Structure formats: structure tokens, C-alpha cells
Image: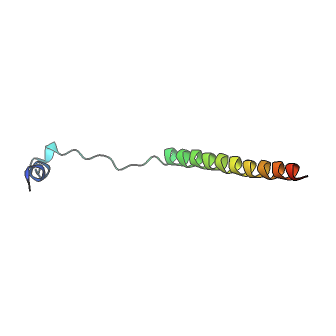
Amino acid sequence: MNNEGLNRTSIVVEDPTQETEAPLRVNVDVLKQRLIEQQKKDRVKRTIILSTVVVSLGALTVLTY
């Protein structure tokens, strides 16, 4: 087993000026927009599936008579 990969990733920064801390902010508007877009896609999928089922049933009804 090779420990070189573990040794490289476990280097601790001792100088606090070298540490960079990313802000932990989340843009709620972006998340809401993503949710709205996902809901629109789901609605379109459901509409297509329902339309396909209705058209298929109609076609079967017409073909049987």
C-alpha cells in the first residue's frame, strides 16, 4: 500500500495567513429559480405522458368500432 497520496493531502497549513475561507452564503433566489425550472420540466413530462395515454385510448376505441 502506498501512503504518498495520503501524505500529500494531509499537509497542514501552519501559517494562518495562507488559509482562505470561502464564504458560506447561499443565494436563495437562484435555488428558487432552479426549483421552479425543475417543476416546469416535471409538469411538461406529466402532460406528455397523460396526452399519450389519452390519445392511445382514443385510437384504440376508434379502431375497435
Q: Residue farthest to the bottom?
A: 1
Q: Residue farthest to the front?
A: 64
Give the colour scheme shown: rainbow
In the foreground, 28 or 46: 46
Residue 1 relative to residue 36: left or right: left
Q: Quadrant of residue 33?
A: top right
Q: Position of residue 16 (x, y in %)?
A: 13, 48
Q: Position of residue 13 (x, y in %)?
A: 11, 49
Q: Position of residue 19 (x, y in %)?
A: 18, 46
Q: From the image, which quarter does the N terminus lie in?
A: bottom left
Q: Position of residue 3 (x, y in %)?
A: 8, 54
Residue 16 relative to residue 56: left or right: left
In the foreground, 59 or 1: 59
Q: How many marks?
A: 0
Residue in the image at 87% along x and 49% along y: 62
In the foreground, 56 or 40: 56
Residue 57 relative to residue 45: left or right: right
